[in-house]
Amino acid sequence: MPRQKLRDAAFILPFFGLILIMPPFVDIFFSVRLLGGIPVILLYIFCAWTALIVLGWVLSRRLVTDAETAEPRAPILHPMPPEQRDADG
Amino acid sequence: MLTADVVVAIALGYVGLLFLLAFLSDRWSRKGSRWISNSPVIYTLSISVYCTSWTFYGAVGSAARNGLEFITIYLGPTLVFLGWWYLLRKLVRIGQVNRISSIADLISSRYGKSNTLAVMVTLMAVIGTTPYIALQLKAVTTSFEVVSGGSGDLLGNRSGDSGGSDPALWVAVGMALFTILFGTRNLDANEQHPGVVAAIAFEALVKLLALLMVGLFVVFSFGGLENLFPEEMSRRLLERENVFGGRWAVLTFLSATAIICLPREFQVTVVENARESHLRTAGWLFPAYLLLICLFILPIAAAGLTRLPAGANPDMFVLTVPMAANQEMLALFAFIGGFSSATSMVIVACIALSIMISNHIVMPVVLRLRWLRLYDSADLKTLVLFSRRFSILLILFLGLLYYRLSAQTEALASMGLIAFAGVAQFLPSLLGGLYWRQATARGAKLGLMGGVVLWVYTLLLPSLAEDGTMFGEIVSNGLFGWEMLRPQALFGMTGFDPLVHAIVWSLTANTALLIAGSLFSEQAPLERLQSALFVDVFRNTPGDESRALVRSAAIDDLRLLSRRILGADAADRQFRDFALRQGRDDGVPVADTAFITHLERQIGGNVGAASARVMISEVVSGETISLDEIIRMVDETQQVIEYSQALEANSRTLEQTAAQLRQANQRLMRLDTEKDDFLSQVSHELRTPMTSIRSFAEALLKADEMPPDQAHRFMRIIHDESLRLTSLLDDILDLSHLESGEVRWQVEHLDPETAAVNAIAACEGLAAETGVRVEHVPADTPAAIRGNRDRLSQILINLISNAIKYNDSAEPWVRVECRVEAGRWRVDVRDNGPGAGDVAPDQLFSKFARGWRQIAKGRSGTGLGLAISAEIARRHGGDLSLTESSDHGSCFTLTLPIAQ
C-alpha cells in the first residue's frame, strides 16, 4: 500500500474500533446466551479487540519500513520567493 | 498457613529483588549498556503502570458489581494506542525535541512557557493523584490483612487497624526510599530513569502473570468454562439495564483521556521514551497486554460469586478465591501481583509529581526569592535534587494522610474515576496546543480553571458529602439553596449518571472557555513561537526557533549557570560538543542565539521550560523576538506544503510541454529534411536547363560557320530552356509568396462551376493533342463560393493537365465531377492513368518532397503544381487531397466551403 494510504488507514483504525465498541453496533451482539461456554457479548468484545490488535500490528509493521526510509527527513525545500515563482510559473 | 510474618518476609524479599534489579539496570545503563532503552517491549511493559491495584483487585470487584462496565477502562487506552501514529507520536516527538519533563511542562511550554499554567496543572495533578496513592496504600493494607489472616476470613472485609504494625506506613516508607534512590539519583537531561523503568517492567510482568494464573486456576478448578459460567451466572453478571448507554461512552472516553493525561502515564509514555520507534511496538502490544489483563476478570468474578459466602468483598476476590480453595501459594503470588501493581503506580506517580513540584513550584519560588544569593554561590543541581526528594516525601505523606482520614469511608473506592475525570481537564489545553495554532495561554488558563471548578463542584464535592454536613446540604439543595445549582443536576440537567453529568459539564465548559479565550485574546510573541514549534513539530527543522529568538550572553555566565544546574561534567560536555558543531576546536562555543536556545533546552530538561527561561533570561541581554520571523516560520511550513503541491502540478505541465516539444522537434527535423531535399532538388532542376543552355551557347560561340538552321535550332533550345527556368522560378516565387501569405488577391462571389468549365476549356488543346477524352459532370444544385476566379481555375487546370499529361492508358479519359456535399462544393478529377504510385499523400502535396521527385521524373512541369494548388485551396478555406490511387487510375478531390 502506498504511504499515504497506510497513514490514512492508521488514522481510521481507532475510529473503526470506536464504532465497533459503541452503540448501536455493540447492541446487536448484546446477548447473555452462551456460545461455547462464553457469553456472546463477551465473545464479541474480545474478538473485536483481538481483530483491532492484529490490524494495529499489521499496520505498525508496514509503517515501520515505510517511516524508516522516510525518517531522515528530507531537507526542507526553501520555497522560491513569490516574484520568482510568478516569473517561472 | 500464611502468617503475617511470612507474608511480610516475602514482600520484603520481593522489594529487595526490585531494588537489586533497579540497581543493576542503573549500573548497566551507566556503563553504556542500552538494552533497557533499546527494548520496545520493556517500554511497553512500563506503560502498563496504567494497571494499578485499582485494576488488579478493583476490576474484578467492578465486574461483580457492574458487569461489563469494567472493560471500558481498557478499551479507551486501546483505541489511543491503536492511533499512535497521530497523537502519541506527535507527543513523543515534541517531548524529545523540547526536552519536556512532565505534562505540566508540556502545557506550560506550549503556551509561552507560562509558569502560571504549570502551577495550575501541577496542583491539579497533585489533587488528582494523592487520593489515588491513598487507594494503592489501602489496597496493599487490605490485601495484606486478607492474605495473612488465613483462610478463615474469606469475606475480605477487614480494614483499618491490624494491631500495631501498619503495612500502609511501611509500604509508603519503602516506596519513598525506592523512589528517592532510583528516581532522584541524579539529574538527567532527559529525565529518564532506566533503573525505575526496568523495575516497573518487571512488576508489569509479575502482575499480569499473577492475574493470569488466578484466572487459569479458576477455569480449571471449575472444570471448564461451562461449569463456571452457567447461563444463570452470565445473566446475573452481564444483564444490566442500558449497559451501552452514556456511561459506557463516557467511561471509554475518560480512560482514553487518562492514558494521555495521567502524570504517571505521561512520564512513562513520553518522558521515559528513548526512541520514537518504540511506539510502533507499543501501538499493538499495549492493547494486547490490556486484553490479557481483562481476559479472566469475569471468570474470577463469577467464581467469587459462586464459591464465596454472600457478603464477601468482591474487591478481594483475586485473593479470596484461591484461598477458599486452599491454594495458599497462589494466593501469595496474587498478593505479590497486587503489591506490584500498587508499588509501580506509587513509584512512577511520585517521580512524575516530584518533577512537576520541584520544577514548577519550588524552583520558581527559589529563583524569585533568593536569586542573587544562589547566583553567587549555591549549587542549583543539589537544590533541585533536594526539592525532588522532599516532594516525594511530601506526596507520600499526603497520600498516607488521605488514606488515614478516609480509610473507613467508601469515598476511596470511587476515587479512581474521579481522578480520571480530574486529569481529563488537561485534555482540551493539550489537544488545542498540539493541533490549534491560535490557542492562547489565556484560553488555556480559563479553560483549565473552569473545568477544574466544575469538576470539584459536580464530582469531588458530592463524593465527599455526607448527610447533615455542609457539603451534603449543598448536594441535596444546591449552593445557597438554589435548586438550579445542585451539583449533580446542574441547571436542571437531571436523569444522568453523576459521572456523565460531571464530565459533560466540566469538559464542555473547559473546551468552550479555551476556544472563546483563545479567540478573544492575542498570543504573546513567545507563545506564538512555541505554538509554531509544537503544532508543526514534524515540519520544522531543529534549531528553527533560533531564527526568531535573537539574544546574546556572555559565555562565562552561561557556563557558570549550566555548570550549576547540569553539573560540571555534563555542562562542559555540552559546551565542547556545541563548539565542535560550530566548527571551533578551542572548546569554547560562540554564545550565539542557537547555542543559548540549545542550552535553555538542556536546562529545561532538568528544571522545566518556564524555570529555564527565567534563569537564562537573567544572564541574557538584548532578547528580541522577531514577530516577522515567527510569521515567516509558520508561513514557510505552509508554503512548503503549497510549494510541493505546486511543484507536482508544475512537473505534470512540464511533462506535457516536453512531449509537445518532442513532437515539435520531430516536425522540425522533418521540415529540415524537406528543406534540404527542396534545395538539392531546386539546384538539380536549375542545373539541368542551365547546363544545356551553357553547352548550346558555347557551341554557338565556338563554331564560326554553323549552318543557320542548326544555329537556329540551338537558339530555340536555349530559349525553351530559359522559359522552363523562368517558369520554375515563377512557381517557386509563387509558392513562397503563398506560404508567407504575402499574396493578396481579389475575392468575389463566384460560381465554381464556371471555373471548372474554364479550366476544361483551357486544357482542350492539350487533350486534343494527346487524344484524351475530357468529361464534365456538373453539380445538381448551383452553388456560390467566395474566392479568386483565376486561382481557382489554376488549381483545376493543374489537376486536369496533370491527369491528361500522365495518362498512358490505351483509352485515356479524364472526368471532372462536381457536386454539393455537406455544405461544401466538391470536385473530383478522376482519370484512368497509372496513379500516384506508393507516395504518401501528405508528401505528394509538399513542395519538393521525395514523392515529388518520383512523379516529376522524366516529365515536364516544375513539380510544384500540386504544392501550389494545395496552398491555394488552403487559403480558400478548402482542401485538396488524393482520394483514390491505384494502377487503374487516381482521383484528386478539391472541396471548398460554400459562401453563406
Image: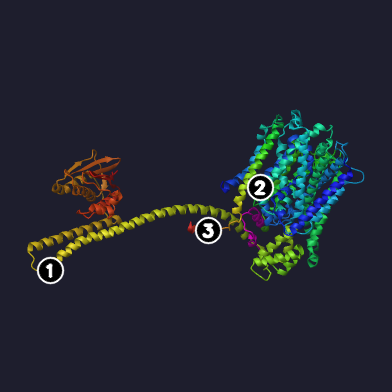
Instruction: Kindly report the distance in space between the C-alpha atoms of the residues bearing marks 1 and 3.
Output: 81 Å
Q: Which residue is mark 1?
A: B702
> Which numbered circle lies on residue B84?
2
Residue B719 sits in which quadrant? Answer: bottom left
| The C terminus of chain B: image quadrant | top left
Q: Chain of mark 2?
A: B
Same chain check for tags 1 and 2:
yes
* In magenta stretch: residue B531: yes
Query: First in sequence: mark 1 or mark 2?
Result: 2
Q: Where residue B292 sits: x, y (%)?
A: 72, 41
The three-letter amino acid code for the residue at tag 1 is: Lys
Q: Residue at x 76, y 49 (%)?
A: B202
Q: Where residue A89 sits: x, y (%)?
A: 48, 56
Q: Which residue is mark 3?
A: A82
Q: Residue at x 35, y 57 (%)?
A: B669
Instruction: Kindly report the distance in space between the C-alpha atoms of the residues bearing marks 1 and 2.
Output: 107 Å
